[in-house]
Image (spheres, rainbow, N blue to C red):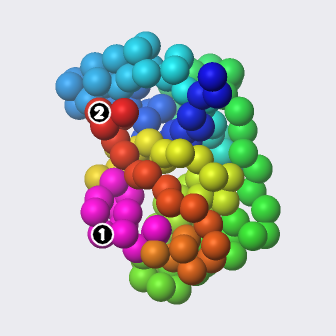
Amino acid sequence: MKREKIYLDTSVVSAYFDKRLKQRQEDTGVFFKTMVPHYEVYVSEITIRELSETKNAVLREKFLRTIKGFKVLRINPQIGELAEKYIKDNVFPRKYFDDALHIAVASYYKMSCLVSWNFEHIVKVKTRRLVNFENKLNSLGTLEIVSPLEL
Protein backbone atom coordinates (compact mmCIF):
# COMPACT_ATOMS: atom_id res chain seq x y z
CA MET A 1 0.00 0.00 0.00
CA LYS A 2 1.35 3.41 -0.97
CA ARG A 3 1.93 5.83 1.88
CA GLU A 4 0.54 9.36 1.83
CA LYS A 5 2.96 12.19 1.11
CA ILE A 6 3.34 14.86 3.76
CA TYR A 7 5.41 18.04 3.70
CA LEU A 8 7.01 19.37 6.87
CA ASP A 9 7.72 23.05 7.15
CA THR A 10 10.54 24.44 9.27
CA SER A 11 8.39 24.95 12.37
CA VAL A 12 7.88 21.20 12.85
CA VAL A 13 11.57 20.39 12.76
CA SER A 14 12.53 23.29 15.01
CA ALA A 15 9.78 22.47 17.55
CA TYR A 16 11.39 19.06 18.08
CA PHE A 17 14.24 20.84 19.88
CA ASP A 18 12.48 23.95 21.24
CA LYS A 19 12.56 23.73 25.02
CA ARG A 20 10.68 27.02 25.45
CA LEU A 21 7.34 25.35 24.63
CA LYS A 22 7.65 22.05 26.48
CA GLN A 23 4.24 20.64 25.49
CA ARG A 24 4.80 21.45 21.81
CA GLN A 25 8.25 19.84 21.99
CA GLU A 26 6.76 16.70 23.54
CA ASP A 27 3.92 16.61 20.98
CA THR A 28 6.46 16.98 18.18
CA GLY A 29 8.53 14.13 19.60
CA VAL A 30 5.45 11.91 19.65
CA PHE A 31 4.66 12.99 16.07
CA PHE A 32 8.15 12.01 14.87
CA LYS A 33 8.07 8.67 16.69
CA THR A 34 4.51 7.55 16.00
CA MET A 35 3.29 9.33 12.86
CA VAL A 36 6.29 10.03 10.61
CA PRO A 37 7.05 6.33 10.02
CA HIS A 38 3.60 5.92 8.42
CA TYR A 39 4.10 8.61 5.78
CA GLU A 40 6.37 9.48 2.89
CA VAL A 41 7.94 12.64 4.32
CA TYR A 42 9.21 15.60 2.34
CA VAL A 43 10.90 18.90 3.07
CA SER A 44 12.05 21.52 0.59
CA GLU A 45 15.06 23.58 -0.27
CA ILE A 46 13.38 26.37 1.71
CA THR A 47 13.22 24.20 4.82
CA ILE A 48 16.89 23.31 4.45
CA ARG A 49 17.86 26.96 3.91
CA GLU A 50 15.87 28.14 6.94
CA LEU A 51 17.30 25.42 9.18
CA SER A 52 20.82 26.07 7.85
CA GLU A 53 20.54 29.72 8.88
CA THR A 54 20.31 28.72 12.56
CA LYS A 55 23.13 30.52 14.34
CA ASN A 56 23.69 27.88 17.03
CA ALA A 57 25.93 25.30 15.31
CA VAL A 58 24.94 22.41 17.60
CA LEU A 59 21.24 23.08 17.09
CA ARG A 60 21.69 23.58 13.35
CA GLU A 61 23.38 20.16 13.13
CA LYS A 62 20.50 18.54 15.08
CA PHE A 63 17.96 20.12 12.71
CA LEU A 64 19.78 18.93 9.60
CA ARG A 65 20.30 15.44 11.04
CA THR A 66 16.56 15.20 11.77
CA ILE A 67 15.62 15.76 8.12
CA LYS A 68 18.46 13.71 6.66
CA GLY A 69 16.29 10.80 5.51
CA PHE A 70 13.49 12.93 4.10
CA LYS A 71 13.06 13.60 0.39
CA VAL A 72 13.88 17.15 -0.70
CA LEU A 73 11.58 19.04 -3.07
CA ARG A 74 13.25 21.49 -5.43
CA ILE A 75 12.03 25.00 -6.14
CA ASN A 76 11.27 25.86 -9.75
CA PRO A 77 9.86 28.94 -11.53
CA GLN A 78 6.27 27.64 -11.38
CA ILE A 79 6.49 27.37 -7.60
CA GLY A 80 7.79 30.93 -7.38
CA GLU A 81 4.93 32.11 -9.60
CA LEU A 82 2.37 30.29 -7.44
CA ALA A 83 3.82 31.84 -4.28
CA GLU A 84 3.58 35.26 -5.98
CA LYS A 85 -0.09 34.59 -6.76
CA TYR A 86 -0.70 33.80 -3.07
CA ILE A 87 0.87 37.16 -2.21
CA LYS A 88 -0.99 39.07 -4.95
CA ASP A 89 -4.32 37.58 -3.85
CA ASN A 90 -3.69 38.40 -0.17
CA VAL A 91 -3.32 34.85 1.09
CA PHE A 92 -0.04 36.03 2.67
CA PRO A 93 1.55 39.45 3.13
CA ARG A 94 4.76 39.98 1.12
CA LYS A 95 6.91 39.78 4.27
CA TYR A 96 5.82 36.13 4.67
CA PHE A 97 6.91 35.10 1.19
CA ASP A 98 8.72 32.02 2.55
CA ASP A 99 5.42 30.81 4.08
CA ALA A 100 3.83 31.25 0.65
CA LEU A 101 6.71 29.26 -0.85
CA HIS A 102 6.20 26.39 1.62
CA ILE A 103 2.53 26.22 0.62
CA ALA A 104 3.37 26.52 -3.09
CA VAL A 105 5.91 23.68 -2.89
CA ALA A 106 3.45 21.37 -1.13
CA SER A 107 0.69 22.28 -3.60
CA TYR A 108 2.83 21.97 -6.73
CA TYR A 109 4.16 18.55 -5.73
CA LYS A 110 0.68 17.35 -4.74
CA MET A 111 1.37 16.56 -1.11
CA SER A 112 -1.57 15.16 0.87
CA CYS A 113 -0.79 17.47 3.78
CA LEU A 114 1.43 20.33 4.77
CA VAL A 115 2.29 19.94 8.47
CA SER A 116 3.15 23.07 10.44
CA TRP A 117 3.11 24.59 13.90
CA ASN A 118 2.71 28.06 12.36
CA PHE A 119 -0.77 29.01 13.58
CA GLU A 120 -0.23 32.69 12.82
CA HIS A 121 0.06 32.43 9.03
CA ILE A 122 -0.34 28.84 7.87
CA VAL A 123 -2.49 26.53 10.02
CA LYS A 124 -5.73 28.49 10.03
CA VAL A 125 -9.11 28.18 8.38
CA LYS A 126 -8.75 31.37 6.34
CA THR A 127 -5.41 30.23 4.89
CA ARG A 128 -6.76 26.75 4.10
CA ARG A 129 -9.73 28.22 2.24
CA LEU A 130 -7.76 30.84 0.31
CA VAL A 131 -4.96 28.44 -0.63
CA ASN A 132 -7.38 25.84 -1.91
CA PHE A 133 -9.39 28.45 -3.80
CA GLU A 134 -6.18 29.70 -5.45
CA ASN A 135 -5.06 26.13 -6.12
CA LYS A 136 -8.36 25.35 -7.83
CA LEU A 137 -7.94 28.42 -10.06
CA ASN A 138 -4.50 27.08 -11.00
CA SER A 139 -5.65 23.50 -11.66
CA LEU A 140 -3.95 22.15 -8.53
CA GLY A 141 -5.43 19.73 -6.04
CA THR A 142 -6.62 20.37 -2.53
CA LEU A 143 -3.95 20.72 0.13
CA GLU A 144 -4.71 19.79 3.74
CA ILE A 145 -2.91 22.19 6.07
CA VAL A 146 -2.62 20.68 9.55
CA SER A 147 -0.67 20.74 12.77
CA PRO A 148 1.19 17.61 13.91
CA LEU A 149 -1.64 16.96 16.36
CA GLU A 150 -4.14 16.58 13.53
CA LEU A 151 -2.50 13.63 11.76
Find out whether the residues at labels 1 and 2 contact each other: C-beta distance under 8 Å: no
**Residue 109 or residue 56, whichever sits in front:** 109
Q: Is residue 146 above or below residue 148?
A: below
Q: Is residue 145 left or right of residue 125?
A: right
SS category of the residue bearing label 1: helix
Q: Which mark is residue 141?
A: none
Local packing at callout 1 (Cα closer than 10 Å; few below 14, some 14-19, many 20+) is few
Residue sitting at x 68%, y 21%: 69
In-front residue for pair 15/144 = 144
| Horizontal and vertical percent position of residue 132 | 46, 68
Few, some or many C-alpha atoms within 10 Å of disc 2 (few <14, some 14-19, many ≥20)?
Answer: some
Real-space Cα separation, disc 1 to disc 2, in angstroms: 19 Å
Q: Amino acid at mark 1?
A: Lys
Q: Residue at x 52, y 86 (%)?
A: 88
The answer to which image quadrant residue 138 occupies is bottom right
Relative to 126, say whether 137 is above or below: below
- Residue matched to label 1: 126
Where does the magenta region start and end?
A: 120-132
Read off the residue under disc 2: 149
Residue 46 visible in the current orientation: no
Look at the image and say whether residue 121 sits in the magenta stretch. yes
Q: Is residue 24 left or right of residue 91?
A: left
Residue drawn 20% across the image and 25% down it: 23
